[in-house]
Amino acid sequence: MQRRTFLAAGLAALAGTAVVGWRLWPQGRQPLLLSARDNAAGQHFAVAYTLSGEKVFATQVSERCHDICMHPSLPLAVFVGRRPATESYLLDLQTGQLLQTFSTPTNRHFQGHAVFDARGERLYSTENDTDEPGRGVIGVWQLTATQQMQRTTELSSHGVGPHQLLWMPDGKTLVVANGGIRTESGSREELNLDAMEPSLVLMGTDGECLSKEVLADSMNSIRHLAVARDGTVIAVQQYQGRQQERIDLLAVKRPQQALAVFPVAEQQRSKMQQYAASVAIHDDLRLVAMTAPRGGRVFIWDLDSAELRLDAPFPDCAGVAASSEGFVVTTGVGRCRAYDCRTEKISMHALNMPAGLWDNHAVLV
């Protein structure tokens, strides 16, 4: 009890300092777009830009990152290593300072995603067990009073090859996208395409599996998630089978309902080229946006009716994040874009940020 009390007191003190720090920022400051980028030489960076194009920081890291996990109260973020990285990076968002490079235990590697709990005391990361390739692991890390991530334990993801995980609105239940693909240490090579096991799992932080659902086609790898504040879950897939097969790449799990296909017209489905990347929900506008980089398209639908709101070309579109006006979308080859969805006709404008080389995910804070 003494140790827990000390940690709680330390984190409370840090949180108090952080709140003051955030308040020193100008009132009405622009949101920060957090993402990972490479440069032309192939070096990796954790970056923050304002939407007007001002660089806040670009911190070099040794391994390519994937998603970004915000602390709920401190100006901290974890830039999570891209599968099969063994490193992730804890950064100070006010200065861009790399506070810690932390590594998975032996025979584990990161799968690209993590989440802090509501108090910001623990981080949960999706990982692969390379002793038993593909066995899903949720690593549990403690944020110490000295702002360091410390491994405490791990849980089963109740599936194979976990990728993204998010909190359900109760803040106690994790939803986990088990991609179903087995890989070995240091490799992205798929080992079990003839016997994939994708699943969507709801689980508690004690490791209990609350539910486990699968899609009709076992080669449809569940990868990325978005959760609305009413508990609606959108899951998007990357199909590992033949290109000519007709496969639905969006699924929805509405409150108290089973996982089901999110209806998408054939005209849009055929443009996705069997590959859905990032997905985001705008709660206030009740919209869902998804990028399809292989098809070079960005889509927006009404979350409740599934009515198509936007189907637009966007080469190598990557991360998508909800903004005050609608969505911001990054890209690997051109200018990032903002979509204003507040009126019936969605408008777009290019953002004055560096062109290209943006990675798969983006977060607005």
Image: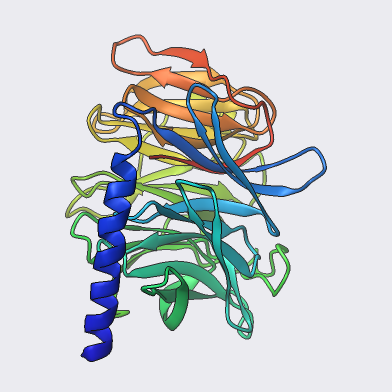
Residue 207 can be seen, yes or no:
yes
The number of numbered badges drawn on the structure is 0
**Residue at position x 69%, y 69% in the image:** 191
Residue 25: x and y, percent? 35, 36
**Whether residue 70 is situated above or below residue 347 in the rendered picture:** below
**Residue at position x 58%, y 76% in the image:** 104
Residue 140: x and y, percent? 41, 76
Q: Residue furthest right?
A: 41
Nearer to me, 38 or 361: 38
Q: Residue furthest bottom?
A: 1
Residue 106 lies in quadrant = bottom right
Residue 145: x and y, percent? 36, 73
- Of the 4 image quadrants, the one containing the N terminus is bottom left
**Residue at position x 62%, y 27% in the image:** 296
Query: Viewed as shown, does residue 39 lie left or right of 238?
Result: right
Nearer to me, 74 or 322: 74
Query: Viewed as shown, does residue 252 lie left or right of 239?
Result: left
- Of the 4 image quadrants, the one containing the C terminus is top left
Residue 38 lies in quadrant = top right
Query: Viewed as shown, does residue 263 lie left or right of 314?
Result: left
The image's colour scheme reads rainbow
Nearer to me, 126 or 64: 64
Residue 198: x and y, percent? 49, 63
Residue 138 can be seen, yes or no:
no
